[in-house]
Amino acid sequence: MSANLIPMLMAQSGGGFAIGIIAGAVVGVGGGYFLLRWLRRSRLEAARLEADRAVTEAKAEAEVIRRTAEVDAKAEVLRGQEQLKKEGDALRAEVKESEKRLAKREDNLEGKLDTLTTKEKNLEQAQKKLAAQLEQAAKQEADLAALAAKRRDQLLQVGGLSMDEARRTVLRELQSELDHESAELIQKSVTLAKEEAGQRSREITLTAIQRLAMEHTCEASVSTVDIPSDDMKGRVIGREGRNIRAFEKATGVDVIVDDTPGVIVVSAFDPVRREIARQTMERLIQDGRIHPGRIEELAEAVRKEVDEAILEAGKKAAVEANVGGLHRKQIELLGRLKYRTSYGQNVLRHSLEAAYLCQVIADELGLDGRLARRCGLLHDIGKAIDHEIEGSHQKIGADFCRKFNERPEVLNAIEAHHGDIPATSPYTAIVMSADAISAARPGGRRESLERYVQRLEQLEQIAKGEPGVREAFAIQAGREIRVIVDAKRVDDMMASKIARDIAAQIEQQMTYPGEIKVTVLREVRAQAVAK
């Protein structure tokens, strides 16, 4: 309808109306065009302004970031310089300390060199004196031989003695003179040795103070369990012995049930198995239910508890000795030593005592106390498994610790602390000394009464076998022997010789831990009677 309306209007209004419409349309189109262009230009201008503003803000932010980075970089450089300065100061201080230590060691070496030089001079002088004494002794021997020949002739001529009688008389006199001179020479040598002992170096002193002790086997291999009645003893045995056989099979020990009232004996060489068996037997008696199934159940439970106790004891020993870095298996073996004894002395406590003594000796000698403690703690570790592996406990312990990359000083201390192989470090000698000190201290070890009495009697018999000895008394649990000699037959020089002879006889004939002191007394008695 609209399409037909416009032509009709144009036809009615004429050509002027059509031209106006066309002109208005053209003007509208042109205005719209310019309006759109203006809007586009405005948007472009706004976008350009926004872009300029974003660029300006980005530049400002970049400038802030750059300045912040510069400040942070400068601060980091300053911190790095301060750190380098601190490290340089610490390094310089360490270098100065090292220089001081080196200077101190150099002074010590110079002092040792001076001491060795002095020793060499003293030894040369002593050799000269000894050569002179030997020459004098040879001269005296020649004089004595001439005198003996002369006196023999005189005795044969004047006394009318036979040759045998004259020979015995001369020999008695010569023996007396030679004994006196030999005792005097020994006394001089001992005095000279005492004077030189104070000047010996630390290594020589360390080697001299220790004394080796023979290896002993632990005698304790049985444990006793109290039982309330003989009826319980029968229940332990079981019908036809089935309970006792099950117990021995489960624990690996021998059970001895005899006529002794109120006691069952558990016997085994392995102290851990013996302890497991003892606790199992005690729990069975307390529980009252004794049959093979219950025995196996309790034995397994006790075995787990003992294993835990062993590990805990090993950890406590390592902490108490302040020795770190031990492998778990080493700690377990240390814990097993808790159940091992030697002459009644607990081996674990003995190892701890040895570790403490090793540190004290090493500190006095200026050596590494921590390494010495480690050597002392591990020196008897082989005793925990010496009943399972063939060989001495020294070699077993060294081979075991070698698997865990122990230091050569520790391995040598373990393997050589009884002198089986040569010592290669001073720590071995330290362990030998600490081992002997811990074993020989009063109360450290115990012996059976019979063996104790035999040792004291043997001491006194050895002392009484020397000529001139009247009485001998063993005192201080056999660690000292007091010898009383006849003052008319023995002088001071002979007393010194008797003491040395008795000490030599004790070393040759007896086995004992530690040392035995020999004291010789000359007793002079003066009596008078008032009437």
Image (cartoon, rainbow, N blue to C red):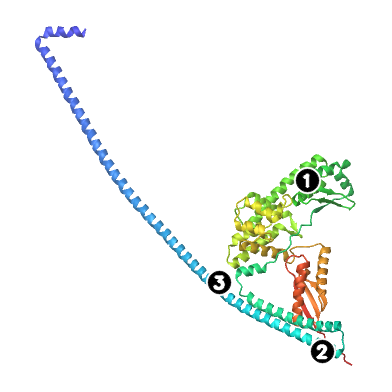
Q: Quadrant of residue 23?
A: top left
* Rendered position, 399 above or below 40: below
Q: Return the x and y of residue 85 as percentages of the image width and height.
A: 40, 59
Residue at the image point whose x is 67% and y is 63% from the top: 432
Q: Earlier in the sequence, mark 3 or mark 1?
A: 3
Quarter of the N terminus within the rendering? top left
Judge the density around disc 1: few (<14), some (14-19), many (≥20) Cα neighbours within 10 Å: many
Query: In the orientation shown, which residue stands out farthest toward the bottom?
Result: 531
Q: Which residue lies under the disc numbered 1?
A: 251
> In the visual, does 428 lie left or right of 103?
right
- Residue flagged by tag 2: what amino acid is it? Gln
* Rendered position, 46 above or below 494: above
Q: Which dot marks residue 418?
A: none
The one of 426 and 474 positioned closer to us in this rendering: 426
Q: Earlier in the sequence, mark 2 or mark 1?
A: 2
Tell me the distance, in whole angstroms, between the alpha carbons under discs 2 and 1.
Answer: 87 Å
Badge count: 3
Depth check, mark 2 against mark 1: the one in front is 2
Label 2 element class: helix
Q: Is residue 381 visible?
A: no
Q: Is residue 154 visible?
A: yes
Q: Are marks 2 and 1 in contact (CB under 8 Å)?
A: no
Q: Which residue lies under the disc numbered 2?
A: 154
